[in-house]
Image (cartoon, helix red, strand yellow):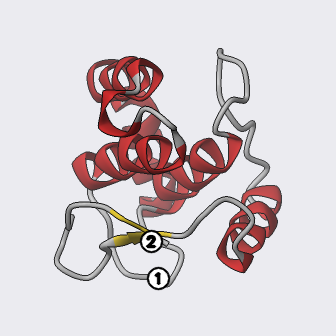
Amino acid sequence: MASVPPLDGKRRIVPPDGDPYWQLVIEEAARLKSDGCTFVPDFYGGACLEHDIHYRTHKWLDGEPITKAEADTRFRLVMQAWSKLGKYDPMSWWRWLAVKLCAHKAWNKHVMSDLT
């Protein structure tokens, strides 16, 4: 497993691609009708599915709450953990910047649906 900087002190590990964790992500994303990597090719598809779960539920897969900033950072860190370029992977940075700056509506959409 690849180590990444801690987000909340508990989630320091990004399981490698192919780990059973990612099968759980695939199943939960299917249940939520995730569209995967929205508007871009499905490179790092598992990262996109996990990110969709975070946005739609506002929770980690284990049920603990997650913030938008944590979800967006985790998205970048997963891509970097899987990339041969690591933290220098340009795709991880531009995708992170896109969700950080432009995905507030998607995040808030699910906040409102949770309240109704």
Q: Secondary structure at mark 2?
A: loop
Q: Residue at x 73, y 46 (%)?
A: 34
Residue 96 position in % (x across, y down): 36, 29
Q: CA distance from mark 1 to mark 2?
A: 5 Å
**Residue 37 in the figure: left or right of residue 72:** right
Q: Residue at x 29, y 29 (%)?
A: 100
Q: Quadrant of residue 64?
A: bottom left
Residue contact at pointers 1 and 2, CB within 8 angstroms: yes
Mark 2 nearby-residue class (10 Å; few <14, some 14–19, many ≥20): some
Q: Secondary structure at mark 1?
A: loop
Residue 48 position in % (x across, y down): 60, 42
In the foreground, 113 or 60:
60
Residue 84 versus residue 116 in the image, above or below: above
Provide the residue designation for mark 1: 63
The amino acid beneath tag 1 is: Gly
Q: Residue at x 69, y 67 (%)?
A: 22
Q: Quadrant of residue 94?
A: top left
Mark 1 nearby-residue class (10 Å; few <14, some 14–19, many ≥20): few
Residue 97 versus residue 63 in the image, above or below: above
Residue 38 versus residue 74 in the image, above or below: above
Q: Residue at x 78, y 70 (%)?
A: 23
In the foreground, 5 or 72:
5
Label annotation for residue 60: 2
The amino acid beneath tag 2 is: Trp
